[in-house]
Amino acid sequence: MQVTRRKFIKISGATAAGLAVSSLGFSLKDARAHTQMLKTKYAKETTTICCYCAVGCGAIVHTSKKGDGRVINIEGDPDHVINRGSLCSKGAALSQLTENENRLTEPMYRAPYSKEWKTVSWDWALGKIAKRVKATRDKAFTLKNAKGQVVNRVTNIVSVGSSAMDNEECWTYQALMRSLGLVYLEHQARI
Amino acid sequence: MSKSFFIDTTLCTACRACQVACKQWHDLPAEKTTNRGSFQNPADLSFETYKLVRFNEQVIDGKLNWLFFPDQCRHCYEAPCLEVADDPTAIFKDPATGAVIFTANTKNLDADEIIDSCPYNIPRKAKDGTLAKCDMCLDRVQNGQVPACVKTCPTGAMHFGESDEMLSLAKQRLAQVKGKFPKATLLDSDFVQTIYLTAHDPELYSKYAIASVTNKGIIAPMLTRQEALQKMFKPFIAAAKELV
């Protein structure tokens, strides 16, 4: 921005007018300059890895030390080698994973053709899932292919994994899927 | 010494991390929006949205360009909102950083008058007339941290630091991009503490990207004659009101 002579006169004129005006009124006390307290000042800091994509950015979670332990803030970890403090819009919204009124805390079930969701117990839900998986798998389990080779595979179930799982969880999960005979193992971050 | 932002829009990918980080740090709620055929979301700044990445599709030299503009308060050196409000308990300038801060006392001001005074169209009012906008994350800055938007920026488009250092960084960066973008320019860099670098004509990015000369603002005469008179009489009117 070039300041031309004309603009300069305009600006200085305006400033002078401002000074003249402010000296007319009552004394304008300088606003008090006290340092504000950070909302994370007394929080506990824990490092974590963002769950959303394969980049694996580091983040610092600030949690309350006042008993409830709820999340106050999550931001990029400046010491993390991958992101050095930065986070994308998904990572920047990490705190909503826990501090979110829309978050479900119990399993919900909607029966076929029903319009209603109802709260069910974990035992009931896991039992239901296991029965359905077993039934679906048994329906299409292939012992041998057309050439007569033993394949022991399931092609009517596909796993799309979960980006919220860590490395060890992923290994356990794929071991479970392969033990069922699944061959279509994908990851949601790639889809 | 004052503090400044330097926002290099040539590096911005419109990931909107700054927008989200701002909401997160200030504990601001989400807004319910509808699909308007643009990725710009929410549609505009609001009492609950201090930072917004503006998306614009512009044809420049026969080629489609998608322009991103992370809009926020410029923290003007001579802030018109502060001058018009004339009430340090409502709008004041933090002496250490130069941040223009709106307090809850903005409720007592004429909100529309303040919004109108801003050459960049930044302040927004709540239903009760309280005004809000970017506060430079003053709590963070006073404790030696950078604002939440700058901290989170993954592409290095957002910078924050001492004003003179930011200005020299901006000039250095301008010189670098001039080869690729001959029309690249710094916006109002001598008047504001949020310096933008745009690759094309700034008006293509946002209607209020620069303080237009026709607009009342920091580059055109700060106050019109009428406003100046109004302001001069303000203390007398207030005193008269107290007497009655």
Image (tube, rainbow, N blue to C red):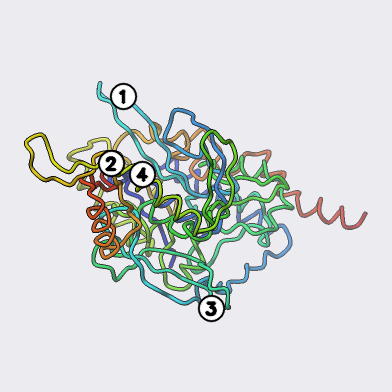
Picture coordinates of residue B146, whole percent (x, y): 41, 65
Query: Seen in the image, is B164 located left or right of residue B231?
Result: left
Residue A77 vertical position relative to residue B8 in the rendered view, above or below: below
Label number found at residue A191: 2
Q: Amino acid at mark 3?
A: Lys
* Mark 2 to mark 1 CA distance (whole Å): 32 Å
* Mark 1 to mark 4 CA distance (whole Å): 57 Å
Q: Respond whether the residues carrying marks 3 and 2 are from the same subunit.
A: yes
- Please report contact status of discs 3 and 2: CB closer than 8 Å, yes or no: no
Query: Seen in the image, is B113 located left or right of residue A80?
Result: right
Q: Respond whether the residues carrying marks 3 and 1 are from the same subunit.
A: no
- Report the residue at 40% width, 49% height from top: A131
Whether residue B78 appears in this view of the structure is no
Q: Nearer the viewer, mark 4 or mark 2?
A: 4
At mark 4, the secondary structure is helix
In this figure, which residue is indicated by the disc labeled 1? B59
- Please report contact status of discs 1 and 4: CB closer than 8 Å, yes or no: no
- Please report contact status of discs 3 and 4: CB closer than 8 Å, yes or no: no
Residue at mark 4: chain: A
Q: Nearer the viewer, mark 1 or mark 4?
A: 4
Circle nearer the N terminus (3, 4) = 3
Residue at mark 3: chain: A
Residue farthest to the top, as pictured: B62
Circle nearer the N terminus (3, 2) = 3
